[in-house]
Amino acid sequence: MTETANATSIEPLFQPLTLRSATLANRIVMAPMTREFSPNGVPGEDVARYYAKRAATGVGLIITEGVGVDHPASVDKTGVPLLHGEASLAGWRRVVDDVHAAGGLIFPQLWHQGIVRDPSTSAHPDAPGVRPSGIWGPEGGTVSLEPEFIEFLRPVSRPATDEEIQDVIDGFARSAANAAKIGFDGIAIHGGHGYILDAFLWGKTNLRDDKWGGDHIGRTRFAVEVVKAIRAVIPDTLPIIYRFSQWKLQDYRAELAHTPKELEEILTPIAQAGVDAFDGSQRYFNTPVFEGSDLNLAGWARKVTGLPSMTVGGVGLNKGFGASTVKRTDSDSVNNLGLLMARFERGEFDLVGVGRSLLNDPDWIYKARAGEPFEVFDPANLRRLT
């Protein structure tokens, strides 16, 4: 179904926000969404058009799809773009130039899949994976991954060595430096969903008792070192946004932090390493996180760190995706902007990430602002660039 947006004004979102040298014209962010349309890791003209089209319709900031960092085991599918290599960097330079020409700002989302990488589909199938403790995670989680895929990845491997961990950190830094050189306006780091940074943070996948493990505070070291390494190689003027989540691909009901105090103790050292804003990734923005409070994940990030935060999850759609019964294709367009704006106007978060709604319709912002009906969600758009 579709609904009109005229019952709720989103004008409060149309005020600027400055993160270091990046001044966003408004608070609407194109959220990162994996597309896999970059053959051999090289984004082409179609990718540039895809992002520039969203910039031209007034998105305050574009955060790209996950981009593989300079490490052989960073990503699996060969259509995932990379941020190293002459051809890939030339492709991204065209994307950046086109987005800037359309009046937009753009950050790459640096990505290392870690435990969740499928080596058999990657350009480097023999590259050893990097796992904090060699384990996939607990059995019996609520997942949307195919059972055969989980069983393929479940066998225990050896824990990552100090040298291997440092190689990953260095790969993040090299790709961040590349991003700065070709003109990106800031850096986004994917630290959620069970991928490598999250795997070090989560107590179910990091059982180490050395300097990379321990309690929930000790487990932040890898994320802290990644942020520090990035901050050291990019201009001080460029902001860093860090994505984190409670849920994991290994279990959608997982909890990174069980209490607000734990969340504060996890996010604070990451913030102090050089993060400027947090992206609190959850499947639906209107879901509270901790008992006794209505705050969502972005709201808690803002509360415990004092930094700006971004909410995301099901904006303009009737369902968030992720659980075994809710696929990306199950959703339909809906006007839930009243719920969103009530949270924004009470100061719960500073930015609004819009994903599938903007993927489905580049003109979604126009429609939301004008109170026009939203386009019916077309699952086929998940399989093409428009």
Image (cartoon, helix red, strand yellow):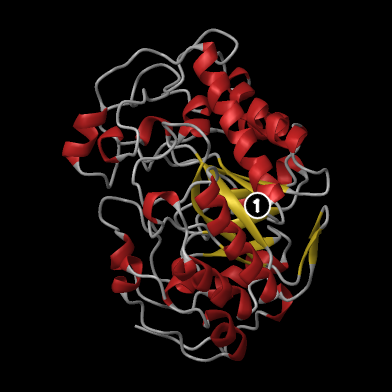
Q: Is residue 116 above or below residue 4?
A: above
Image spot of residue 138 (x, y percent): 32, 26
- Residue 135 is left or right of residue 101, and the answer is left
Task: Give the residue at x 51% y 51%.
Answer: 88
Coordinates of residue 105 in the picture (x, y in percent): 69, 65
Relative to the observer, which residue lies in front, 13 or 290?
A: 13
Looking at the picture, which amino acid does disc 1 mark? Gly
Q: Residue at x 83, y 52 (%)?
A: 20
Can residue 290 be seen here? The reply is: no
The N terminus: image quadrant: bottom left
Q: In the rendered view, would you say 150 is above or below 28?
A: above
Residue 386 lies in quadrant? bottom left
Q: Residues within 10 Å of mark 1 (few under 14, many from 20)?
A: many
Residue sitting farthest toward the left: 148
Q: Secondary structure at mark 1?
A: helix
Q: Is residue 61 above or below residue 169?
A: below
Question: Where is mark 1, residue-wise?
Answer: 299
Residue 212 screen position, x and y as percent? 57, 15
